[in-house]
Image: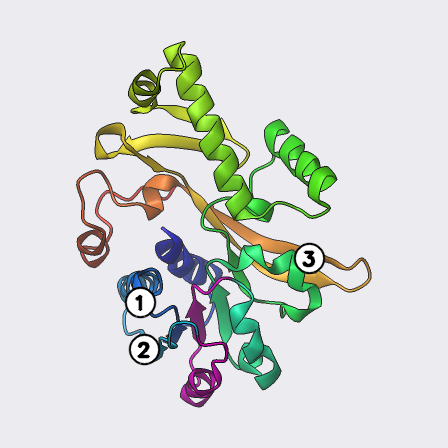
Amino acid sequence: MDSVAAARYLVATGAPSDTIAGINQNYAFGQDNWRDFSATMAQLKSGTEIATEQFPKIHAGQYGSEISALLTSTPDVVHSSFWGGDLIQGSARGIFERSKVILSTGETAMHRLGAQMPDGTIIGARGPHGDLAPDSELNTWFRKAYFDRFGTLPTYPSYKMAQSLLGVKAAADKAGSSDQDAIIGSLTGLEWEGPSGTVSMALANGHQAIQGTAYGTYQYDKDTGSATLVDIIHFPAECVNPPAGAISMDWINGGFEGAKCE
């Protein structure tokens, strides 16, 4: 859903995207993210061309040659699933000025990097987490409690752990028991509220959760020293996740049959 939503955000905001490029991890997560993003772009915008695709060597600390390839290929969009701060080393070489950059996991770094994160960068949080989370009493409490404890705002890994714990609690409450098998049984098909909204065990016969997601565009306020996201778009779970029983790539290449995006 990270990659499908990233492509949908580009199209929805009218960002130039005739040519795309990627720099992603050279293992399954990065390869799958790029595969899904480029395939989704091909479906949503006919004629989209891949300028270059880069997979730096695992554990490489510098991406000089890969960034050079991105610069010389001059794509409209650069997609990356690196963990937020890794690609910022390309900022000094002007990559963010030449191309629209979309970081599908960039939310983890936005408050830590501050002014180092260029304005206009498109940011994802692997779900509607962090600054992309919907307004709710639970989210307001969670952000305050986290900040009071750690002196920084929670990012998507913290949101995911919180919703996992709340899911187990909801299942235990439903089961009326602390027995592990009873909790597992109650978790099947369960729906509960977390600080980032509703989580539904809707796939794999009630054993796999789905949730919507969101993307926004980064802005840094130098006067207040605060990072924010603007032009946020939320995508329903059924818009960016394949339906039960569908193989992801078949669903994407088939034109997202059954997707509900309204």
The image quarter in which residue 149 lies: top right
Please tell me whether residue 70 belongs to the stretch shown in magenta.
yes
Can you identify the residue that label 1 sits on?
Answer: 38
Separation of disc 2 and disc 1 at Cα? 8 Å
In this rendering, the answer to whether 176 lies above or below 261 is above
**x and y, in percent, of residue 37 in the image:** 33, 63
Residue furthest out toward the top: 176
Which segment did they paint magenta?
Answer: 60-83
Whether label 2 touches label 1, CB < 8 Å: yes
Q: Earlier in the sequence, mark 3 or mark 1?
A: 1
In the rendered view, does 170 fall on the left or right side of 132?
Answer: left
Q: Earlier in the sequence, mark 2 or mark 1?
A: 1
**x and y, in percent, of residue 99 in the image:** 50, 77
Disc 1 secondary structure class: helix
Q: As shown in the figure, which amino acid type bears the numbered disc 2?
A: Ile
Rendered residue at 52%/47% (across/down):
156
In the rendered view, does 225 fall on the left or right side of 47?
Answer: right
Callout in the foreground (2, 3): 3
Whether label 2 touches label 3, CB < 8 Å: no
Q: As shown in the figure, which amino acid type bears the numbered disc 1?
A: Ser
Local crowd size for mark 1, using a 10 Å CA cut-off: few (<14), some (14–19), many (≥20): many
Local crowd size for mark 2, using a 10 Å CA cut-off: few (<14), some (14–19), many (≥20): some
Can you identify the residue that label 2 sits on?
Answer: 50
Separation of disc 3 and disc 1 at Cα? 29 Å
Q: As shown in the figure, which amino acid type bears the numbered disc 3?
A: Ala
Q: Earlier in the sequence, mark 2 or mark 3?
A: 2
In this rendering, the answer to whether 56 lies above or below 252 is below
- Whether residue 18 is visible to the viewer of this picture, yes or no, is no
Foreground pick, 37 / 168: 168
